[in-house]
Amino acid sequence: MRIIFVGLFVGLFLILSIPLLIAEAIAGKFNVQAKYASSMKVIRWAFKVVLWICGTKIEVYGEENMPTDRSVLYVGNHRSIFDILLFYSITKSATGIISKKEVGKVPLLRDWMNSIGCLFLDRKDIKAGLKMVLEAIERVKAGLSILIFPEGTRNKGEGLLPFKGGSFKIAEKSGCDIIPFAIINSEAIFEAHKPWIRKAHVAIIVGEPIITAGLGREEFKAIPEKTRDAVLAMYESKHDEIVPKTGE
């Protein structure tokens, strides 16, 4: 039943929020940063409702590491389509996500994503990908944080997949801090038993900032692996406590 209620809520939200979406678009012509912030409040509320319908219990650790006075690059692991909802339910400031271009083809969803500053990546078009990264750099410099999942796809195995380094250019060229985070047990909401949604206990751990300002090119080469190590350490620190043992 939960998947039906989630589908109904999302459908109704997308349709009934059209006037609000239009208002946000108009406001954005005068102050784009205000539009990002305002739209984030709407999206955060909607995502919290979805997670409530799903019966998801969320524990958050290190929330104080999420700054509200500057833009950053958030970097985390990826195990579920619900990871985005989980992250946005706790973030404190306007944050856009880098998503695959296929998501950008969905009407209304695409428009709300644009309204919070999201960018769409065509992984088959190197030139378009470079242009997207350059746009993300400019948005970070202008005050919008960016969220990336550098594993590149949802991980169905243990631990973390290798991190792809391309999106880290956003931090290198903007000089922003990197905030690593780990989401634990999000696959228990949906992926572990598709097509059903079930109650789940999820943990989100936010790590201390990784400073990139002032690093030389050679020094920065170690940053993707350093960030992955930080995310993996946080993931492993709570995994056995949060994820039920087989048979439980």
Image (spheres, helix red, strand yellow):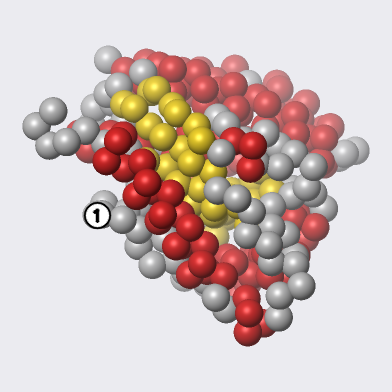
Q: Residue furthest bottom?
A: 218
Q: Residue 190, located in which quarter of the rendered image? A: top left
Q: Quadrant of the C terminus?
A: top left
Residue identified by numbered label 1: 157
SS category of the residue bearing label 1: loop
Horizontal and vertical percent for residue 49? Answer: 50, 18
Which residue: 51% across, 67% down?
A: 226
Q: Is residue 201 left or right of residue 90?
A: left
Which residue: 41% across, 54% down?
A: 233
| Residue type at numbered disc 1 | Gly
Horizontal and vertical percent for residue 29? Answer: 86, 40
For the residue pair 71 and 230, the one nearer the viewer reads as 230
Please indicate, yes or no, whether residue 15 appears anywhere in the rendered image. no
Q: Is residue 157 above or below residue 108?
A: below
Which residue: 17% across, 36% down?
A: 245
Please indicate, yes or no, whether residue 161 appears anywhere in the rendered image. yes
